[in-house]
Amino acid sequence: MKRVTSIISPLSLIKGDVIGLVAPARKISEQELAKAIDIIKSRGYRVLKSPHLFASENQFAGSDAVRASDMQQMIENPEVKAIFAVRGGYGSVRMVDKIDFRPLIRHPKWLAGYSDFTVIHNHLIHLGLQSLHATMPLNFAGNTPEALDSLFDTLEGKKTHYAWERKLLNRQGSANGILMGGNLSVLYSLLGSPSFPDTNGKILFLEDLDEYLYHIDRMMIALKRAGILENLAGLVVGGLTDMHDNAIPFGKTAEEILRESVEDYGFPVAFDFPAGHQPDNRALIMGAEVQLEVTETGSVLDFKKC
């Protein structure tokens, strides 16, 4: 893929706009989406369901071709101003190469999701397009008000500014750069593919769920050996949730593993950002220029453009 030097931000949404719902990975039921659709409508938006939103093929929401076709229709539909992935699981990587994202260059729109949707976020970076790492409709009913507000506030163009408490493993410093990343396991799976981002001079965000500690260590060592970490401008770590250990302990927490992986470098590191597989999952604009400040009192993440 051609490397881009500027990244396009989609237009802000206004009340009455249409939000499209797609299922790029695991299947979902109408019942599981009912509350989220009510929430979207209560925020003043119309909802358009993709044609095969409730399709089922084993664990997937239909075949790879069906899921890709649904995404393509939403991308090309001029009425749709934002596209929400309704849930994660596994599946986006199976169909990402079947989608033509180029219409988004001419008519940008927000694509939002997290976890498995990390594939799409990083694929879009190569095309010079911002996207939104944020909670998904499956999670809306259990999200904090702050998580939901951050999603809709960002879509509506309100300035994004986050400040959170100091953590012992933080490394102080200041950095500016493009924000990218997402789920560590998914990002690791993209190594060597056209969807893997150029991390040089960038601020990397990482989160993960339900992994063994030695898996976390293996993935971070792989990123380090591939030269992914050494030229970062900064690292922001979100939730590392429900980690597992073996009968013989690994000896480090997930946070300690990540900190050790970047010990040789001097960029700032901020832990415990409120995003990931947790109720308080705040929205992050992937591809946006951000400023990261990590001090002895806490961390601040400012988005320069929204």
Image (spheres, helix red, strand yellow):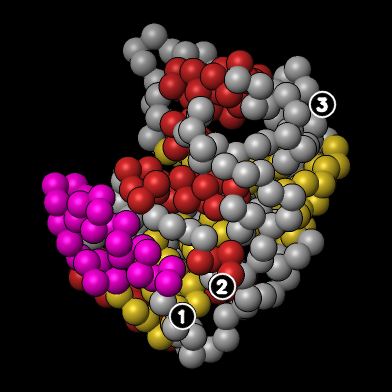
Q: Which mark is residue 107?
A: 2
Image side of residue 249 versus residue 51, left or right: right
Which x, y percent locates residue 59?
A: 19, 47
Q: Looking at the image, which residue is at 40% across and 24% down?
A: 212
Instruction: Look at the image and tell me whether residue 171 can be seen.
Output: no
Q: How many angstroms separate mark 1 from mark 3 (CA)?
A: 45 Å
Most foreground residue, 25 or 299: 25
C-alpha separation, residue under disc 3 versus residue under disc 2: 39 Å
Q: Are marks 1 and 3 in contact (CB under 8 Å)?
A: no
Question: Is residue 178 toward the left or the right of residue 136 in the image?
Answer: right
Residue 217 location in percent, x, y? 52, 19
The residue beneath circle 1 is 78
Q: Check if residue 69 falls in the magenta segment.
A: yes
Label 2 element class: loop
Image: magenta residue range: 50-76
Of circles 1 and 3, the one toward us is: 1
